[in-house]
Image (spheres, rainbow, N blue to C red):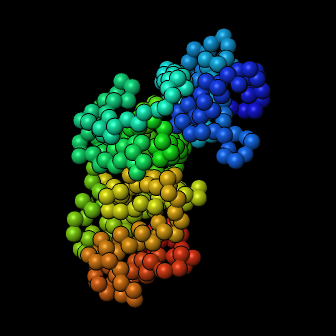
Amino acid sequence: MAQAQRRHIPNEIRRALFDATDRRCTICRRPLDIEGGSHHIGEMGHIAPHSPDGPRREAARPAEVDGLGNLMLLCPSCHRTIDKEPGLWPDEHLRAIKAEHEGWVVVERARPEPDKPLDEELTGLGEIVEIGDVAYRVTSDPEEERSADGTAIVSRAFAFAPDGRHVWIRRIATRWPGSEALERRVALAAEAGLFTEALPGLPPPVAASMTAETAVLVTAVPSFTTLAGFYGGRGREAEAVRVLAAGVVGLCEGLASLHARGLAHGALDPDSIMTDRNGALFLRDAGRAFLRPTEPAEDVRRLAELIHVTVTGRPPVPLVSAAILNPAVPEHFARALDRALSCAPAERGDIAELGTGLRI
């Protein structure tokens, strides 16, 4: 919202909102005071919009549109997320999140010493994941990962949406706001916000949900087939090399969208890259872009390494061209891989140059 709108909010409302939320983001629970400083990064977001043409304009606007009941204290990332794609964050959902968070603050203040829940209280994905009144049917064995500090369990799985679409679900379940759980929730919220921008090559968001106990992001995928599953040892064939060269274009486009914003995927592997029935490759998600930042040059090197293994059946060896290991690989294709595999990051070129060099 614009600064001119924020000035309409009375100081007593501001103070009450900061107190009711314990100076934390209502959605991801990130502390909003700058550590070691005297300022904060908190932003006051409207549930029903301040102006008739604002986000969630269809919501009923209360008489006190700048009143405490219509405001949420948010970090900049969560504020941008809910306003960029208001259809994923309807007013009734935001009001429920506000009530849960502010209720949690009351309970925590009344509790002398918070009790750590037992690990078994944290559960992963079941057969059905519900977001609002929409149920997603899980089709694969979920990947489960517990945070090192025991505050969260991260689950990932493929699922079917009610309309038959293939989707990728990630959920963070937590019972109290440990530092690692908060870090993961902030990263997931930031990723959801990025995807709502509909950038080339990045997966479109299907649904998102943030409550005090869970954070969920659902994205569309072209199929349940991964790079590893599609090629399955067939990458040395001449036709497979041709299909791979054509299919990598969309993947490079998605990585370029991340790199243009100073981000890097940082977790490319044969199972994080998806393919459709024609062999076009796609990112499944943004990897570690918002969690453990790496350099774009590392994405370039890692993608070249994966392609080299796919078309030769073995890891790269210095001074040994992919065209030597597999005669079906064109010389210019092999040179593009060699450049991207350089030990010096500055010599690898960018991801667009790799995609161009691999064209057949």
Total marks shown come to 0
Above or below: residue 217 compared with residue 106 = below
Q: Which quarter of the picture shows residue 20?
A: top right
Seen from the viewer's position, the closer of residues 340 and 25 is: 25
Q: In the displayed structure, would residue 28 be above or below residue 147?
A: above
**Farthest front residue in view:** 112
Which residue appears at 36% of the width and 87% of the height?
Answer: 320
| Residue 208 seen in the current view | no
Q: Quadrant of residue 4?
A: top right
Q: Is residue 71 visible?
A: yes
Instruction: Give residue 71's position: percent from left, percent from top.
Output: 63, 23
Q: Is residue 332 above or below residue 157?
A: below
The picture places residue 46, in percent across and down from the top left corner, at 63, 25
Q: Nearer the viewer, residue 54 or 211?
A: 211
Residue at image location 70% in from the left, 20% down from the top: 13
In the image, 91 versus 178, the foreground residue is 178
What residue do we see at 32% from left, 77% from top?
315
Whole-percent x and y of residue 317? 36, 84
Q: Which quarter of the image is occupied by the C terminus?
A: bottom left
Q: Residue at x 47, y 58 (%)?
A: 265
Q: Residue furthest bottom?
A: 319
Q: Where is residue 253 drawn, in percent x and y?
A: 48, 59
User: Which quadrant holds the N terminus?
Assistant: top right
